[in-house]
Amino acid sequence: MASEFIFRETPWQRELPEVMGARHYRFRPPGVITRHQLKFWVLSYPLRCAGVTLRVGDSGPWRPLAAREACLNAPGTLTYEDYRACGEEECRSDYVIFTAGRYDRPLRELCRGGHRRLPDPEGLLGRHMHALAEAAPLGAGRFLAANAELLAMLDLILNASPPSPPPSLAEKLIRLFERDPAADFSIDSLAARLHVSRSTLSHRYARDHGETPMAAVNRMRLELAAALLNRGLPTKSVAAECGFCDEFHLMRNFKRHAGMTVGEYRRQRE
């Protein structure tokens, strides 16, 4: 089941963007790899796409499509969609084919390599896309409404803040430590809580941050211990709060790393 209307074959003017076609698309997965290369801009918005992967160009990596993550393709961009692993579940997607007018250049700067994925966590793009695809089958009488929705989407795309980079392993480790400094921070426990293998955690953390994860945990424990000792807390309480086995474990580690005993540190701070 699909509804579609092609407004016109050539843009009515060069300055403003113009919708060339829009569609609600529902289909059974074909079980093959499909190839797409259009001469206009294409913005697709997958709604149900379990198991579908996409590749840009003949040598790019295959990446899974994500529902409610828009895909923007520049004119002439070659893409492949692989439906062989998505089973029998119906696929659903909205899309619009358009010219960009004066916005062609900033869109091309956004789409390095001809393709850009646009996360839509609040569903703003999706709502405009749905309204545009709803207007399409009503024909030329909804031409201005359809183009208004396109302009609203381009405004969101070109003025959106860039997504924050994912937190590094160090940032994730700091958050875990701050949540519970006395928790089990063995390498196996850390790997499980950070959702990586023990080997990956050990090698990547040391490569990216210049110390092992266990050394980082010990450093943070000693920094916290020093702050608590400054407040006059008993050594036994500090050891328990910072995750040391006992006060003697704390004192051995403290002397090794600070070059002085806990008592000397306290007297120095008086």
Image: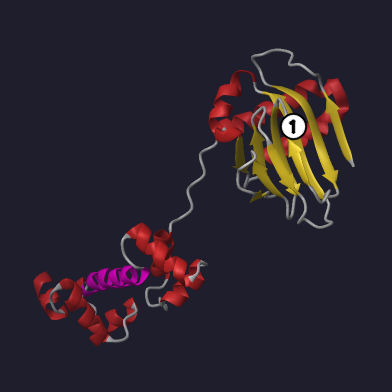
Quadrant that contains the N terminus: top right
Give, as a three-letter code, the residue at label 1: Val
Return the residue nearer the eye: 40 or 61. 61
Predominant SS along the magenta part? helix
Q: Residue at x 87, y 39 (%)?
A: 2
Q: Is residue 182 magenta?
A: no
Residue 114 position by quadrant? top right
| Left or right for 111, reference 182 | right
Return the residue nearer the eye: 18 or 144. 18
Q: How is the image coloured?
A: secondary structure
Residue 231 position by quadrant? bottom left
Return the residue nearer the eye: 92 or 207. 207
Q: Is residue 138 above or below residue 250?
A: above
Q: Position of residue 100 (x, y in %)?
A: 65, 23
Point out the stretch of residues depicted in magenta: 213-229
Q: Is residue 234 visible?
A: no
- Callout 1: SS: strand
Q: Is residue 17 above or below residue 222?
A: above
Q: Residue at x 57, y 34 (%)?
A: 113
| Left or right for 71, reference 166 | right
Q: Is residue 46 above or below residue 18?
A: below
Q: Is residue 219 magenta?
A: yes
Q: Please give the residue where the numbered disc 1 appears in the rendered image.
A: 96
Q: Position of residue 88 (x, y in %)?
A: 84, 56
